[in-house]
Amino acid sequence: MKTPCPCGLPRDYDDCCGRLHRGAPAPDAEALMRSRYAAYVLGLEGYLLDTWHATTRPASLDLDAEPRPKWLGLKVLRHAPGDADHATVAFVARYKLGGRAHRLEETSRFVREAGRWFYLDGDLREG
């Protein structure tokens, strides 16, 4: 049975972010960002930490803390490769928390090391 990918692309999860969650390298920063959003939706803390650059990675994310957000959707606004090993991705993620809708807007920075992309950091706006 096909399962829609949480990242918003019209693809089956196993053929989209599921491949990355199982260890395949992301082809670009946008694919990594989409897979990280899907990991938040699915509660895959290990994947999120593994794809976070070691210089900025937190010790844990505590994704099971209550109340848990209900992720509603992702919209990629812009993917801007800087050079072969740096890129930014601007996106909006919508979620519900405690009955209220929220909007998280971020421009994320990514770096590629040894052929793998990592989330470095980002400029965040929540509303």
Image (tube, rainbow, N blue to C red):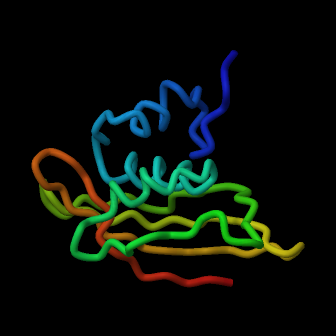
Give the image quarter of residue 62.
bottom right
Q: Position of residue 54 (x, y in %)?
A: 23, 68
Q: Please name the residue shown 33% across and 55% down the image.
A: 50
The quadrant of the picture occupied by the N terminus is top right
Asked where in the image residue 56 lies, by quadrant, the reply is: bottom left
The foreground one among 31 and 14 is 14
The residue closer to the viewer here, 107 or 36, is 36
Question: Is residue 78 found left or right of 44 in the rendered image?
Answer: left
The spot of residue 61 in percent (x, y) is 50, 70
Is 28 placed above or below 17 here? below
Q: Is residue 127 above or below residue 57?
A: below
* In this view, 65 is above or below 44: below
Residue at 40% across, 33% down: 22
47 left or right, relative to 92:
left
Whole-percent x, y for residue 34 in the image: 48, 50
Taking the image as shown, residue 72 lies to the left or right of residue 98, namely left
Q: Quadrant of the C terminus?
A: bottom right
Quick one: which residue is furthest to the right in this view?
Answer: 99
The quarter of the picture where residue 122 lies is: bottom left
Please give the name of the residue rendered at 67% of the width and 71% of the height, measured from the top-left corner.
65
Q: Residue at x 28, y 64 (%)?
A: 110
Q: Residue furthest top?
A: 1
- Give coordinates of residue 96: x percent, y percent: 79, 68
